[in-house]
Image (cartoon, grey):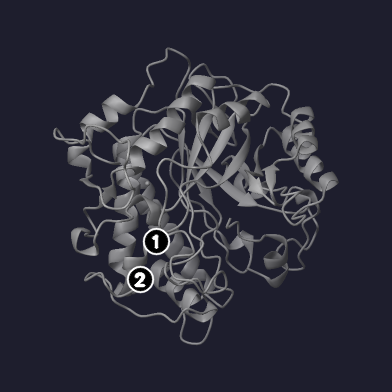
Amino acid sequence: MSKAQRAVFPTSMLMVVVILAFWVSSLSGMDGNNHTATSTSQTQTSQTQTSQTHTSSRANWLHTSGIKIFNEASQEVVFNGISTMVLFGYEPPTFPSPTYDESRMDEARSHGINLIRLEIGFSSSVYGIPASQQTPTSLTYNVGFFPALDRLVNECTKVGLWVNICFVMGSMSPIGGAWSSAKGAGVGFPTWMYDQSWSYFNKYYPNTAVGLSDAIRDFWNINDPTAANVRTAYQTWWKDIAYHFKNAPNVIFGLWNEPQCGGGETIWGGTGQPTQVQGAQMYKTFVEQTVDIIQAVAPNHLIFQNDAYFWYWSTNPKIDRPNIVVENHAYTRIDQYSDPVDNPTNDPMYFINLGWRYNQPFFLGEFGGIEEGNLQDRAGTIHNMQFCNSLGVSWSYLSFRPFGGTWNPSAQTWIDIENNLHPNLKYF
């Protein structure tokens, strides 16, 4: 990622519970910290079947064909959406979410959008379960996690929203690095995975930007066994999520929000480090392996694949799997993105072509943030909506959350969104 990209594309900081035959009789009074339930693919069937309400005869499943997305009725689908903050908080999380309930899903839908991104942290899904009960291939989840997530997904089903379940990582917990010096203050991997209390991974990283960058590199360096068990656990998490929602046609899997971003130091290409080219190839291999694991249990879902933060966006390789939608984020007009190496001709289609060059759809997964420190100005935000709509490209505004003593978007921004929706939106 170039210095210019860091300035323009800031990282937003903002998981499968098994219901056993002896499940607790009520979730009321649950403290969210000390209730556990084993949750592996082999023991999820009851939870999956009983908690989801996806039996509609509507044209449900989506698929990609070239640069477009279609439903089962062969109608083109374009997403105009909005993003939440981290759904259940950091560590400790709160189940159900104190910020988002069914009425908030209804509110979002009332403004005409057809997609909502729910930001999820691995750390919140397994919080309160001792590290000794977790293995790379078998994870145990907090008993509050899946019921809390299901209630929102089910409400979205009722009101016609697609749901992007998006894995977010603001830190390799407890390494806040450039984001935070407080243990557990970030979202992503559970603290026990990185504080040397997990027997499957015990490397120490300093709580600095360099430490965070080293942890990120170790994760993505699949030729180095250092973090192999962390990588396996991540894939197990996605396998469990996919199994849980395999019968939910309105759920989309967002693999990783802004991968390889956050440390602020060199990930690839430094002295003794793999090159950018090697890093890109390892990224491709690992992401395709993860997609294969997901699609083995849930073959019909769209998958949003966020470009990795290499030095240049164009370095990102093609993820050569079905139903992939290439995602990237921008807090400036995407038709004015310029870089002397990455886009020397100032091609206004450069950003869109990050997906289209591979004959895959493109999704502008974050932009806007007008009231959030003026991440992007209002005129540029509106222009991005209009530009994407003119090309049939999907977008999702950031964000839908409390901020600065009020809720965003503001009334004016909601009006701007409503006035700039794609003219032929479909709903789930």
| Gap between marks 2 and 1 measured at Cα | 8 Å
| Residue type at the position of mark 1 | Phe
Residue 231: percent from left, percent from top? 33, 62
* Amino acid at dot 2: Tyr
- Residue 47 horizontal side relative to residue 412, left or right: left
Residue 71 coordinates in the image, percent (x, y): 51, 23
Toward the top, the furthest residue is 57
Between residue 404 and residue 343, name the one nearer to us.
Answer: 404
Q: Position of residue 16 (x, y in %)?
A: 30, 41
- Residue carrying label 2: 194
How many neighbours does mark 1 have within 10 angstroms: few (below 14), some (14-19), or many (20 or more)? many
From the viewer's perspective, is 143 left or right of 291? left
Circle 1 residue: 189
Mark closest to the chain's N terminus, 2 or 1? 1
Labels 2 & 1 near each other (Cβ < 8 A):
yes
- Residue that protrudes farthest toward the bottom in the picture: 271
